[in-house]
Image: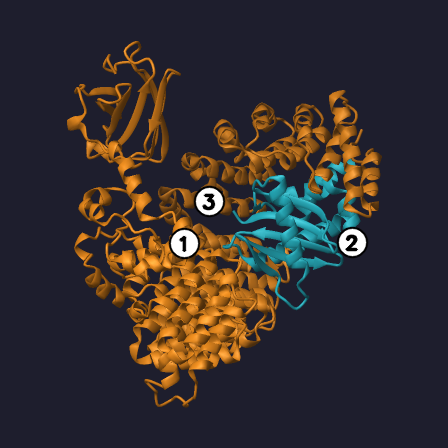
Chain colours: A cyan, B orange
């Protein structure tokens, strides 16, 4: 399966984007997000980027005020996920130009479209930034 | 109109939510917005539909319910324009899930869009299908997806490949249809298609053994070539990460090779060279390179032995482990865990480094390292490793202590070379982290101590010293209290002194001090106090000089708010005061607890979860005295009449001796090897007040043994117990006299068909292909209205039935009483039956015949089966 969810959370622990690749109901999601955010945000820069929580392994990385948290299976390559987070951020950077929390908040649907081009059902679809952004740019042009 | 640029109101809403200072304000804003959206939905407002949905997605992300927007998604998907569909599909993926019935409605739209002539719309539909499709949708739409894997545009092919993964997961039978299209994808050049194709192949291998064989034969070489091309490819700016071309593709390829190579020497051989190349040539100064190395090592460890490669892999892990980057160290530990099954010796070489990681400041690394150390321990290194870990226990974080303690205890138990070492280590752990030690661990310690007869003196003295140093460790206090209660005189007289010990002088009064501290300590819980109370009773006999002081302490517990302690203190007080003649035998030392039985029970039962329940069971060894049992039995001449002891008898006894409050869990630690006679005697001695009519009880052993209870009052006890039975007898539900009445009351219920009036023929009340139910009838002549029915069920099928439940219902003029069934499992093919007694009282006896509706539920092959029927063929005169 690989990726089970992707979260973007700000320094205050508010969710800015949440994409789940397995079904969790509203209460479960809120509880999970709360627990993970508490666990990850309490860690310092020197500590490693992996946290084990319930049956998930959380790979997280901080960019300025925004945390990117990816929940994966135990068999997943943690370092590759870390690299994937960076690819995601670079892709968003290319589109938004130095992406920040507000870009994602106010363009939530676009952030999701990008994610859709990169991950589907927990698997990686595409790793070329140009290919990921092509449909989104096309749509922007059309409107 | 573009739904996103025109969404000023969406921006407004987000701004309003951002401006909220408190959660309550946020809720208010969201509530207002939701109300507006609902209104708009019910007016079927087209213009704002997409904007509403965009808002709903934001609200959903914040964690508020948005189910009312689900239908809007479907409407947008059904719209013609791309922007509407775009947001509709996004909403579908975020707001809905495969369990909802609404999803059924979208199947048709999906099908149309999969065949759309606009490839972006096809892409949208594929993506949605890949994320949320259910098993039914998978079956319906699989042909479309299969076709799209040959679509001209690679962006569609890659999505179709991933969509197939979802379909195969939902319906594994379809895997074979996708085998050949997946094979073709591996020949592509487009990275997106390759990476998805590789993932699809991996998934197919997981569900189908045939496919795995197919890929092994046909694709191993292809994949090796693809990997070689990627590894050696010139600079490709679009896919380059830190000088490596598409590390993600590297990793997926290595993963599929691992699946193919596992358990297949030829395939493993085929990938040997490329793995060696990846392992030696990949740059390890950047994360991307390390990710590849990490995956490569895992593949090398999993495929069939090619020893040269394994050395490479272990060396890479060694480098990882000494890396300064915590991420790299973490994955190294993770990987070593897997490597240990392959090459334990190589992992052992890194033991010192791993041990350092246990002491890391990072909780994730500590956890991994501790688990690794745990599997690294063997007979030869247990002593130094345990010492290191126990030393670290002193300085570790409080939140890590629980894990660490559990692992240390487990290591020490499993590998201890000798008992004295085990006891020493456990005492150290108890002194450092006694509050984290699990109940079964200190229970086991007590069993071991009890068995090590030459170490009793040493242990009790060590415990005494440890107690002086750390009074606050609950489990240490319990073990110390138990040992002092048992071996107190060894403590005082320095019996069994070992060479290594320093002599200590402990007076009887010092020993009693320990127990007194334990019982009066504010943090002591009920278990500890109960144990201390019993220890006091024992010491009262062993230390005659302190007897009065002990009695004072016991008497103080009379005022305890805990009923259990109160009652015991009263009982013990009267034993000390009034029963000097039996006291010494009553409180003799515990028999040696049987380790094998204890371990067997422990392995069989779940670990105790509630400390109270298992705490109670531990009181058992303190309270029960086996040696006294035999003399008492002789004394009372009871043994021949005694009823066979069910294995749980110790529990019953415990209830009475130590308290009904302390519910005895299933994990009753099996420490009781006490003959039933002893417990019964004690039981009667301590709890049963009223002397029973002795002769009658002795003459009815059969009835007694067939009833649930088997408490055998003894004639001689009358004399023994009557003086102490003043207050307890009234409240004691197990009083012997009421017991006898109860037994009398039971008698008519026992099936005694021979003197039961007219005989009725049995009937087959119900029969299906799998099950037959027969009824046997009997009546008591005194009560013609009431019929006793014995139902017996026979399984006619070749499968065993489990969770068998029989239910019956009768009309108002009948009264039905169902006894419990003889079991809930029905063996196959008539090899046994379940019987259940029913009592039917017919208020219109002689006017109307019996009639009954029945329902039988059971599980066959783990499937629930329900059978129902009506029984009209009762004999007429019932």
**Quadrant the N terminus of chain B occupies:** top right
Kindly identify which chain the residue marked by label 1 belongs to. Answer: B
Query: Which is more foreground, mark 2 or mark 1?
Result: 1
Instruction: Give yes or no for contact between labels 1 and 3 (Cβ–Cβ under 8 Å).
Output: no
From the viewer's side, name the closer residue of B572 and B55.
Answer: B572
Secondary element under disc 2, as helix, strand or loop, is: loop
Residue A92 appears in the rendering = yes
**Quadrant the C terminus of chain B occupies:** top left
Mark 2, other Cα within 10 Å: few <14 / some 14–19 / many ≥20: few
Q: Position of residue B825 (x, y in %)?
A: 29, 37
- The residue wearing badge 3 is B203
Query: What residue appears at the point 34 percent right and 55 percent down from the top-left corner?
Result: B653
Q: Which mark is residue B122?
A: none
Instruction: Give yes or no for contact between labels 2 and 3 (Cβ–Cβ under 8 Å).
Output: no
- The residue wearing badge 1 is B728
Q: Earlier in the sequence, mark 1 or mark 3?
A: 3
From the viewer's side, name the closer residue of B60 and B805.
Answer: B805
From the viewer's side, name the closer residue of B539 and A32.
Answer: B539
């Amino acid at each position: 399966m690989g990726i089970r969810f992707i979260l973007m959370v700000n320094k205050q622990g508010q969710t800015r984007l949440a994409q789940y690749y397995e079904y969790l109901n509203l209460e479960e999601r809120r509880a999970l997000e709360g627990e993970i955010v508490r666990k990850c945000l309490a860690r310092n820069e020197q500590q490693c980027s992996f946290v084990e929580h319930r049956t998930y392994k959380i790979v997280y990385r901080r960019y300025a005020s925004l945390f990117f948290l990816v929940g994966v299976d135990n068999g997943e390559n943690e370092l590759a996920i870390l690299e994937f987070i960076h690819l995601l951020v670079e892709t968003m950077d290319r589109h938004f130009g130095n992406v920040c929390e507000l870009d994602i908040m106010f363009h939530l649907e676009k952030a999701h479209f990008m994610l859709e081009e990169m991950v589907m059902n927990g698997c990686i679809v595409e790793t070329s930034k140009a290919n990921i952004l092509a449909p989104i740019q096309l749509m922007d042009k059309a409107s | 109109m573009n739904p996103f640029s025109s969404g000023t109101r969406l921006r407004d809403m987000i701004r309003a939510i951002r401006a909220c200072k408190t959660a309550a304000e946020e809720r208010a804003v969201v509530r207002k917005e939701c109300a507006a959206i609902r209104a708009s939905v019910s007016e079927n407002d087209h213009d704002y539909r997409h904007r509403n949905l965009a808002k709903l997605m934001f609200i959903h992300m914040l964690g508020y319910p948005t189910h009312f927007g689900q239908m809007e998604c479907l409407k947008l998907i059904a719209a013609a324009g791309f922007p509407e569909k775009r947001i509709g599909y996004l909403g579908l993926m975020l707001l809905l899930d495969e369990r909802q019935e609404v999803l059924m409605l979208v199947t048709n739209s999906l099908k149309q869009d999969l065949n759309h002539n606009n490839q972006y719309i096809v892409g949208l539909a594929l993506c949605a299908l890949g994320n949320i499709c259910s098993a039914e949708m998978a079956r319906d739409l699989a042909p479309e997806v299969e076709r799209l894997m040959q679509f001209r545009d690679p962006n569609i092919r890659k999505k179709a490949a991933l969509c197939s993964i979802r379909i195969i997961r939902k319906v594994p039978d379809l895997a074979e249809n996708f085998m050949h299209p997946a094979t073709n994808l591996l020949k592509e050049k487009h990275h997106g298609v390759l990476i998805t194709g590789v993932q699809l192949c991996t998934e197919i291998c997981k569900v189908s053994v045939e496919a795995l064989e197919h890929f092994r034969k046909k694709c191993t070489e292809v994949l090796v070539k693809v990997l070689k091309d990627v590894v050696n490819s010139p600079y490709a700016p679009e896919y380059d990460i830190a000088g490596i071309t598409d590390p993600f593709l590297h990793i997926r390829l290595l993963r599929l090779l691992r699946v193919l190579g596992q358990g297949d020497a030829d395939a493993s051989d085929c990938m040997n060279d490329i793995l060696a190349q990846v392992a030696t040539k990949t740059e390890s100064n950047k994360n991307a390179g390390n990710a590849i190395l990490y995956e490569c090592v895992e593949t090398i460890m999993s495929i069939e032995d090619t020893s040269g490669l394994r050395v490479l892999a272990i060396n890479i892990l060694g480098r990882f482990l000494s890396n300064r980057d915590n991420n790299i160290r973490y994955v190294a530990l993770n990987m070593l865990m897997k490597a240990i099954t392959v090459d334990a010796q190589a992992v052992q070489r890194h033991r010192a480094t791993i041990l350092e990681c246990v002491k890391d400041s990072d909780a994730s690394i500590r956890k991994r390292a501790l688990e690794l150390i745990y599997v690294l321990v063997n007979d030869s290194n247990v002593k130094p490793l345990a010492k290191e870990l126990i030393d670290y226990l002193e300085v570790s974080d409080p939140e890590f202590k629980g894990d660490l303690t559990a692992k240390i205890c487990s290591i020490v138990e499993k590998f201890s070379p000798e008992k004295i070492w085990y006891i020493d280590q456990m005492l150290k752990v108890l002194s450092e982290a006694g509050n984290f030690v699990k109940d079964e661990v200190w229970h086991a310690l007590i069993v071991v101590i009890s068995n090590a007869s030459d170490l009793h003196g040493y242990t009790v003295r060590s415990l005494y010293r440890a107690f002086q140093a750390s009074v606050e460790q609950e489990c240490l206090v319990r073990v110390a209290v138990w040992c002092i209660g048992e071996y107190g005189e060894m403590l005082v007289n320095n019996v069994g002194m070992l060479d290594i010990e320093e002599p200590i002088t402990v007076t009887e009064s010092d020993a009693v001090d320990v127990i007194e501290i334990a019982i009066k300590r504010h943090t002591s819980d009920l278990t500890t106090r109960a144990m201390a109370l019993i220890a006091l009773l024992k010491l009262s006999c062993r230390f005659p000089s302190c007897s009065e002081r002990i009695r004072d302490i016991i008497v103080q517990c009379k005022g305890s708010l805990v009923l259990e302690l109160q009652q015991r203190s009263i009982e013990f007080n009267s034993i000390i005061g009034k029963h000097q003649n039996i006291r010494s035998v009553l409180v003799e030392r515990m028999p040696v607890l049987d380790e094998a039985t204890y371990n067997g029970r422990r392995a069989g039962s779940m670990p105790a979860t509630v400390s109270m329940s298992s705490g109670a069971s531990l009181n058992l060894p303190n309270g029960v005295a086996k040696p006294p049992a035999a003399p008492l039995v002789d004394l009372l001449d009871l043994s021949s009449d005694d009823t066979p002891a069910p294995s749980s008898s110790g529990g019953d006894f415990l209830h009475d001796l130590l308290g009904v409050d302390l519910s005895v869990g299933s994990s009753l630690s099996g420490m009781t090897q006490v003959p039933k006679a002893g417990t019964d005697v004690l039981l009667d001695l301590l709890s049963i007040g009223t002397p029973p009519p002795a002769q009658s009880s002795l003459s009815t052993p059969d009835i007694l043994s067939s009833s649930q209870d088997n408490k055998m009052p003894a004639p001689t006890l009358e004399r023994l117990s009557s003086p102490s039975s003043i207050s307890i007898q009234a409240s004691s539900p197990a009083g012997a006299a009421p017991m006898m009445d109860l037994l009398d009351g039971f008698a008519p219920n026992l099936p005694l068909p021979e003197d039961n009036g007219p005989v009725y023929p049995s009937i087959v009340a119900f029969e299906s292909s799998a099950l037959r139910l027969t009824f046997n009838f009997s009546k008591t002549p005194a009560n013609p209205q009431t019929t006793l029915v014995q139902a017996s069920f026979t399984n006619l099928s070749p499968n065993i039935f489990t969770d068998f439940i029989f239910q019956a219902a009768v009309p108002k003029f009948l009264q039905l009483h169902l006894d419990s069934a003889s079991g809930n499992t029905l063996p196959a093919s008539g090899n046994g039956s379940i019987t259940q007694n029913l009592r039917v009282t017919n208020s219109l006896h002689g006017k109307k015949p019996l009639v009954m509706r029945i329902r039988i539920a059971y599980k066959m092959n783990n499937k629930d089966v329900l059978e129902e029927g009506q029984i009209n063929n009762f004999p007429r005169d019932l």
